[in-house]
Image (cartoon, coloured by chain):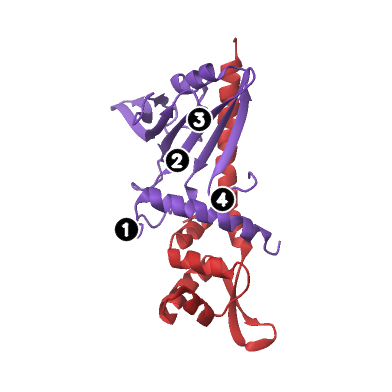
Chain colours: A red, B purple
Amino acid sequence: MTRAGGVFAALADPTRRGVIEALVNSPRTPGELASALAVSPQALSRHLRHLRRVGLVQAANRENDARVLEYRIRPAALRPLRGWLDRVEALWEKQLSSFRDFAERDR
Amino acid sequence: MTAGAGDFIKASVSVRLGIEQSFRLFTEQIDQWWRRGPRYRNGGPDSGLIHLEPRLDGRVFESSKSGQGERVFEIGRIVEWSPPARLAFTWRNSVFADDEMTLVEVDFTSQGASTLVTVVHRGWAAIRPDHPARHGMQIPAFQRSLGVWWGDQLSSLRSLGK
């Protein structure tokens, strides 16, 4: 599976999308995430593992309290996905310029 | 990528022709302008012919001749047919799973003597190469919700620590 494919697959799940949304503004602990999303700690931990594996989130100790583990988003993981869309866009731009050339020829 | 894009791409071109004629050429003569070669067509070394049946639920498909006769690959179906302003069709790549599809919308807008042709190709966030099953949701609803979600999220995510 491509990296972009892995990111799409990870985000196809509503709970995992909820995790990303919850992390957009600030890092959170697994406990905070589980209660915000109303899922069990076990289920959440499975989803976090999936998101970690595709590189969408990372875990680190809180800056001012090393006992607290918190999760944050890794925006870099979205890059391959944007690259994929960029290629789709480039193909359509070529198609449309080909259409223009054809349409304007001899008319 | 276009600013504000979520799970869709947008491309446009201005053509020095009226809207009626632009729409007609785009649809009726699609094989004439559709690029050739493996990046644009599936039909092997000789490239297939691209067809578009000009009506609601018409097929958009590629056909190619081989030793075994004619081979047809259906790209999608027309889901909106409003000449000369707009058409939309579903779109599958040959690598998509059976239940995976995206949507191509084409808008024609008059600009004096010219016509602006805009393609929006959406639904990419719903394409999951490894997981064909989709939580029992209807595909269009799923694509819509995910498409909107992407649109909302990507702008936030992009503004995060560059």
Q: Which disc number belongs to residue B103?
A: 2
Q: Amino acid at mark 1?
A: Gly
Residue topped by disc 1: B136
* Mark 3 closeness class: few <14, some 14–19, many ≥20 residues within 10 Å: some
* Mark 1 closeness class: few <14, some 14–19, many ≥20 residues within 10 Å: few
Question: In percent of the image, x 51 and y 18: which residue is there?
Answer: B20
Q: Earlier in the sequence, mark 1 or mark 4?
A: 4
- Give the distance between the C-alpha atoms of the residues marked 3 and 2, in whole angstroms: 22 Å
In the rendered image, the quadrant that contains the C terminus of chain B is bottom right
Tell me, yes or no, if residue A57 can be seen here: yes
* Mark 2 closeness class: few <14, some 14–19, many ≥20 residues within 10 Å: many
Question: In percent of the image, x 57 and y 17: which residue is there?
Answer: B18
Question: In percent of the image, x 37 and y 50: which residue is there?
Answer: B139
Asked which secondary structure carries label 1, the reply is loop
Residue topped by disc 4: B6
**Label 1 lies in what chain?**
B
Q: Earlier in the sequence, mark 3 or mark 4?
A: 4
- Give the distance between the C-alpha atoms of the residues marked 4 and 2, in whole angstroms: 14 Å
